[in-house]
Every structure is written in C-alpha cells, then in structure tokens.
Amino acid sequence: METTMTCAEESRAAEETLAGTFKPADTFFLIQTSLAEYGGWGGEIVKRAGASGGFAPYLQHLMKAPRAKILFIRRPASEGKNFYIAVTNQGQPRIYHTILTDYDEILTLELDSIGEDRCPRINGYDMHDEGELYTVCTNGRHDPCCAARGTPFYQALIAHAGEDKVWQTSHIGGHRMAATMIAFPQGIVYGHLDRSDAEAIVTNHRAGYLMTHKYRGRGAYAGHHLDGDAHQAVGAAEGRIRERARLYADADLRLSEVIETGDQRWRITFLDGDGARHDADVNMGMSAPRQTSCGDAPKPMPQHEITILT
C-alpha cells in the first residue's frame, strides 16, 4: 500500500528509537560555501563535490584525516569562507575555527596537527578554539523533510544560542529523523527535534547534559575506534543505560569495553563517575521496511535489541 506520510512523519509515527542511528566520525570538517559551481546544495553533494570539480582536491585532502566527515555549512545572506574542525575522539573534544581568504588554504592544513591536545594548523597558523557550535540539516534538495522541519528548528535555535553559534548544514544522515542536528565540540547528534526543543537543547548542552529522549549518538567515544555497526550498538546501549540509571550528564558515563560476542552481537560496558559498571548486551537486527527518504521504496533498517545486565 502506498504511504501518504513523509519519511519524518513515518519515523515519528513508528516511534523509531533514535539512540544508535549515527555512524562514527572522529573528525568533522565544516566548510562554508554556496557550491555555486555544483548548482548549489543538492542530494549527495559531498560525494559529488569530492569526485570532481573545483572542490574535489580540498575534500580529498581532508578525507585523509582519521574517520573524517565533511559538512557544508551556510547562513542566509552570509558569503564568508568560515572553516571549522571538530576533533571528537579525545578526552576533551574541541572545535576550532578560522576564516579562509581562499579555499586553496585547505590544502595547507597540516593533517598531523589534528589530534589529542593539539591545535590544527592551516597556512602555518594555529586555528582558534571555538568552544561551542550547532549545525542543523536544512537541505531540502536532499530530502524535503530536512527543509520543512530543519529550517524552523534552525530559526528557533538561533534565538537561544545566538546566530554566530548556529549554521545550516548540507546533510548529517538520517533525514527521516528531521529535524536533526549536531552539537559541538562533542559531536552529539539529536533527532525528531521541534521548535519547542531549541531552548532545552542549548541550556542542557551548555550545562553538560544530554537530552536522552532526542539522542541519536555521537561522533566518537574517546580512546575507541569502533566500526560502524559496533559504534551504533554502543550508541543504542548508551541511550538505554542513561535513561534507566538517570545518568544525564555527559560526564556521567565513560565507555570502557566493547566485546563482540557473536554475529552482530556485542557486550558493552560503561563506567559511571563512581567507577560502577553498567553492562548491556546488544543484538543488531533489521526493522520492518520503512521509508529512509521521501519518495524512496521502503527498506529494512538496523535496529537494536538491548538487554541491561547491571
């Protein structure tokens, strides 16, 4: 039967679990550009720009960084060349900023300067520690739900975080969970957001707390280099453990161990601030077919069965 719901409406109607739906990324690169050469922002624009055209050498250079994720960013009526690097797989995540005079400067980025307690260097100069930033997916040419739900949320977020702290971005992944966003420097990802969530997102993020009922996951867990499936399983376990134990501060839990116990099965251990263990078994299966993007044929998506042990 043909669906009459958008992908975002269907995800919400199905009460799709959000935790465990973001893939790993140790390093985020955010580049302000209108991409006029490519006809503006479109679907799969990062892949297209990385394959050919004037931006290809820049993106190919950046993709040499550990588990890099590239986001194009923009603001209405802003024509600068802002460039950010968020380093999430370290004890103290950070996001750094500079304003480029020419995109060719990206090729001068010293990739070996990206790492634990090191400031990235570009054009021979250290980048500046930004402290806090938010990106909201609004790319309606990738999926109409991103514009329909992301744009109003973006506007509401500006009212609480300030325009200088908020950007529109080309694609985060998981547009059926629109509005979806990333809060930096930690690289914390949220979904199913509405305008009414904006104040709580900013207030909690600045206080070091997570909104677990909107939590999709994060870019990385400090000191761990997990493959995509294991990373998402850890995100699913983290969300469930936090809600069950009421551990809402980001610092309340630290990933300790991930053991593969079978095909698509893991035993995951977090430690809380007192050193107590929180263990969970996670089994990844597939959901019933659902829309992943408006207009696409439904297909099964990964889902997680979680058993809390301690």
Image (cartoon, rainbow, N blue to C red):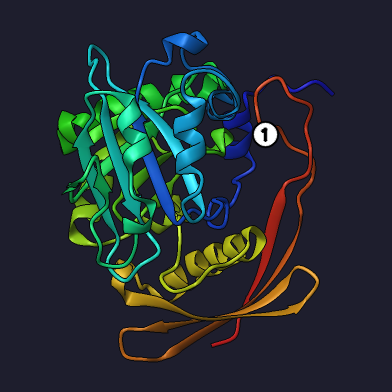
Residue 200 in view (yes/no)? no
Establish if 224 lies above or below 196.
below
Location of residue 287 in the rendering, given as x and y in whole percent from the top left corner:
76, 50
Q: Quadrant of residue 227?
A: bottom right
Residue 141 in view (yes/no)? yes
Q: Residue at x 37, y 22 (%)?
A: 151
Q: Quadrant of residue 100?
A: top left
Establish if 146 lies above or below 185.
above
What is the three-letter code of the residue carrying label 1? Answer: Thr
Closest to the observer, 31 or 239: 31
Q: How many marks?
A: 1
Establish if 262 lies above or below 154.
below
Position of the N terminus by quadrant: top right
Q: Residue at x 53, y 68 (%)?
A: 225
Closest to the observer, 117 or 224: 117
Closest to the observer, 249 or 167: 167
Q: Which residue is mark 1?
A: 292
Q: Quadrant of residue 275?
A: bottom left
Location of residue 24 in the rendering, given as x and y in whole percent from the top left corner:
53, 55
Q: Say which element carries label 1.
A: loop
Location of residue 102 in the rendering, given as x and y in whole percent from the top left corner:
28, 23
